[in-house]
Image (cartoon, rainbow, N blue to C red):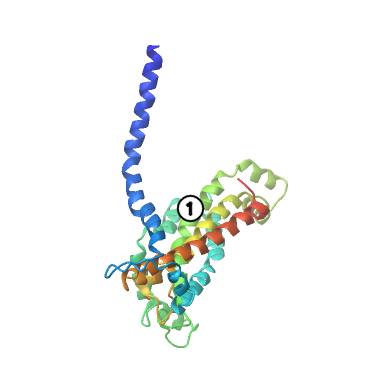
Amino acid sequence: MKQKRVAKLSRFSEVQTAWLFMGPGLILLALFTFWPIIYSVPLAFTNYSVIGETSFVGFENFKRAFSDVNFIASIKNSLLYMIIVPFIQILSILMAILVNRKIAGIKFFRAAFYIPVVTSMVAVSIIWGWLMSSNGVLNYTLLSIGIINEKINWLSDKDTALWAVMFITLWKGLGYYMMIYLAGLQAIPSDCIEAAKIDGASNFQVIRKITIPLLKPYVFFCTLISLMAAIRVFDEVFVLTSGGPGNETLTSSLYIYQQGFEVFEFGYSSALGIIISFIIMFFSIFIFLFNKKGGVNPY
């Protein structure tokens, strides 16, 4: 009886300790993530703008959004941004396969590829902004080897600005997804690969027939989160181009920010946020359905 009481008190103490550690994080999450999301829903049906009276406007903000040329342009750019998703997944898998080898100094290469991930996006954007300026290293290198005939201001030219920012996003994200795929590769039983090689399978056949199929759950997860990140991209666009030239790099997240914190139309900004949330939800459901129908093996 005494032992049961001691065990019960021990479990109670463990639960209290767990809540003690989780509590501050949960409070911050509730205050700065869940509460703004919940509060934005009723706000989207008002004309709240900090200054002036707030009144209920029904679906007026949503009607305005679908006739707003700038918002349509921002959605178009955000959807175009999704082009990087397959590229970032393919390159990340190849990098993971390369760094999954047992060779001397491989830990250095893994760390080197991961450094961009832990570097601030603002710092990365500033460095790439300098590299891509008209007098930057990129133009100098391309002119030296004869790929271009004249300097290009990659971030100010309407034909290259969006692609340049997309490249920076891709470059920074490679290390993050590489580490996820590396974890997946190391979870694959070595017996499968060794058996295939004993049967005469080449390295390419091992990758195609064993590695890639067993990585499919990881591909599903990485595709889903990279797709969401592509639609919500903000930092690099805000730092490097502020949506310009014109609206060529204006993304949906940046436009929502501008409407909320530059124009102070929080009601309209909330409505735009809800529309973008539904777009992200649509693509997420599509990926889940693709997974369910056999595009990706279940876990």
Side (left or right) of 88 relative to 259: right
256, 219: nearer the viewer: 256
* Residue sitting at the far bottom: 150
Percent x, y of residue 287: 59, 58
The residue beneath circle 1 is 179
Q: For the residue labelled by badge 1, is the local secondary structure a helix, a strand or a loop?
A: helix
Percent x, y of residue 108: 42, 54
Percent x, y of residue 258: 35, 72
Residue depicted at x 47% and y 52%: 106
Rendering quarter of residue 239: bottom left
Q: Name above or below for residue 161 compared with residue 101.
A: below
Q: Quadrant of the N terminus?
A: top left
* Residue sitting at the far top: 1
Q: Amino acid at mark 1?
A: Met
Q: Quadrant of the C terminus?
A: top right
Percent x, y of residue 119: 36, 60
